[in-house]
Image (tube, grey):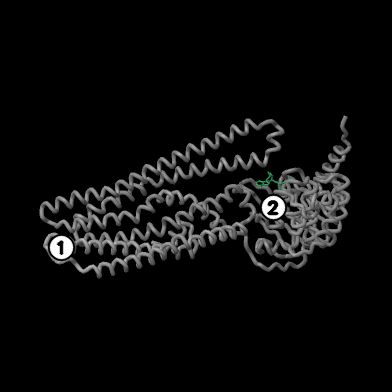
Amino acid sequence: MFSKNFQRKYALTDQGIRNTRKGAFWTVIVNLIVMGGMGILYQMTTAFMDTLTDGQPLPAALPFIGLAVLFVLLSFVTHLQQYQATYGLVYNEVKATRLSLAERLRKLPLGYFGKRDLADLTETLMGDVNRMEHVWSHVLGYLYGAYISTTVIAVCLFVYDWRLAIACLWGVPVAFGLLFGTRKLSARSSERTKKAALRVSDGIQEALENVREIRATNQEDRYLDGLYQKIDAHERVTIQGELGTGIFVNAASVIMRLGVATTILVGANLILSGQIDFMLLFLFLLVITRVYAPFDQSLALIAEMFISQVSADRMNEIYDTPVADGADHFAPKGHDIVFDHVSFAYDKETVLDRVSFTAREGEVTALVGPSGSGKSTCARLAARLWDATGGTIRVGGVDISTVDPEALLADYSMVFQDVVLFDDTVMENIRLGRRGATDEEVRAAARAANCDEFVHRLPNGYDTPIGENGARLSGGERQRISIARALLKDAPIVLLDEATASLDVENETKVQGALSRLLTGKTVLVIAHRMRTVAAADKIVVLAEGRVAEEGSPADLMKKGGLYRRMVELQSQSESWKLG
Ligand code: ADP
């Protein structure tokens, strides 16, 4: 019953499955003890009935009182154990699950995050785990425990009288049959609800992120209308879903309880025909109320258990995605980066096609080419943010696909166009470059990257929080923070993607100074659109449509008169272009 499949079906950790077993065990004990209580009640009633009908002396009260006290004690202790095993331990399970999902996410290749949007992932980590928590705590232990205890009780009832047993229990399989029969419907409506909810949260996130554009283009009304429609649609499918499952769950509950009526009917007939005495019917009626009780709670939540399949699937999808792992130890011989017939596709379409080139240590290698030719992709692959689909990339002779990204990235400084900043102070954002760097070291790096000038204008200098993803900073300022980070890290490989694109001329000149300090002696792979940025490079690799079109020193390529020369000429023309 609690196999590997079960564990996967409910996305339980190893500890979780052990706790579920424990929960089911204590549920069985609790249910049997409650039945024992019914037994005491039955014995008491029989004794009193004997007194009433046969004039026998009143039974001694003490044994009954003793039994009742024992029952209360046992009941208390076992309920406590059951509570611990179902509700108590589940909080650890929630924590363990979130941590194991987060740990998994940390190791997934970056490409995965491009495929699944972030609102969706957050929903899995928070919402889906919450939903599973309800199932783990309220349903699994109780339901599976009730299956076992009811089977035991059913066997006993059959031993007493099979006719009454059938009259009493037929409702249970029929009710569950109905629920399991309609579970596809529940799952489908839950999937619909989840999609509608996701559309709403995506819409809100999009609106917040693009509030400036929406206002600037006067699209507020149109956008809000769209959002309201999504909210209405969500409301509609949620109500439909609740109604659907509500009908089936209540119908199942009523069907199960019809057992009381059939037991009375069959029992009365059996008494009338003299086949059983009244006390047996009384025993069955006592028992019957307790047979249904354990199912009550799980029945109300069973729809949730069916629906939870969607959540469990989404969690399993994260567990199933192969992680980008490898050796923790990265000891290359030097830091030459070699692309050896590297091919790559984000989806189906080939973005890089057998690209080969070498970026040598101590040299600046510039990637140029028309937009969309695959330059940024090369930089991302060089840092193993994605894994190449064909060919190998070696750093100092080591195939980087065999190295754990965390170990690998210790040797990289990256200044990318899309700078990621955290909602923290300037100081902490720069310190991300090297954990444990002193404040003075951070300030020195910031000065070298020309951050000083704008940081001093902030209300609290380096201790000013910069808002979510640096919302308070301009593009150029963000980029300088990113350069400061790289300076602080001082890694042997530097990847620059359009590093100076958002800087004005004055700042660019200042930052260039800082950059040249950063770049000396390193393996530098730089992507720049502006030809004058790359004219000083040692080597240029020209990409066109995912292939290496030409490579060589800037002077050689100018002489050759190919794509590079054309790009240089085109840019010098556009730079001499003036307004009016
Ligand atoms: P460049 O840096 O030369 O402008 P890129 O490497 O950014 O070119 O892009 C190369 C191709 O890959 C483009 O066609 C682009 O649309 C596609 N591409 C880039 N990033 C992604 C991504 N995350 N998912 C899917 N396709 C992408």
Name the residue rendered at 62%, 31% in the picture.
Answer: 222
- Of 481 and 328, the residue lying toward us: 481
Q: Taking the image as drawn, is residue 25 in sight?
A: no
View extreme (top): residue: 580
Say few, some or many: other residues with alpha carbon within 10 Å of mark 2 (under 14 / 14 to 19 / 20 or more). some
Residue that carries the numbered disc 1 in the rendered image: 51
| Residue 298 visible at all | yes
Task: Tell me the amino acid under the disc marked 1.
Answer: Thr
Q: Residue at x 30, y 52 (%)?
A: 173
Q: Mark on residue 161?
A: none
User: Residue 405's quadrant in the figure?
Assistant: bottom right
The percent position of residue 44, horizontal first and vertical second, equals 22, 63
Above or below 513: residue 243: above
Q: Is residue 560 left or right of residue 313?
A: right
x, y percent for residue 84: 44, 64
* Secondary structure category for the residue under label 1: helix
Q: Nearer the viewer, residue 337 or 565?
A: 337
Vertical arrangement, residue 417 with respect to residue 406, above or below: above
Spot occupied by residue 229 in the image (x, y as percentages of width and height): 55, 34
Against 78, residue 464 (above or below) is above
Q: Is residue 167 positioned above or below 160 on the image?
A: above
Which image quarter holds the C terminus?
top right
- In the image, what residue type sits under mark 2? Arg
Q: Residues within 10 Å of mark 1 (few under 14, many from 20)?
A: some
CB contact under 8 Å: marks 1 and 2: no
* Sequence-earlier tag: 1 or 2: 1
- Placement of the N terminus among the 4 image quadrants: bottom left
The mark tally for this picture is 2
Disc 1 versus disc 2: distance between alpha carbons? 98 Å
**What residue did someone put label 2 on?**
354
Question: What SS does tag 2 mark?
Answer: strand
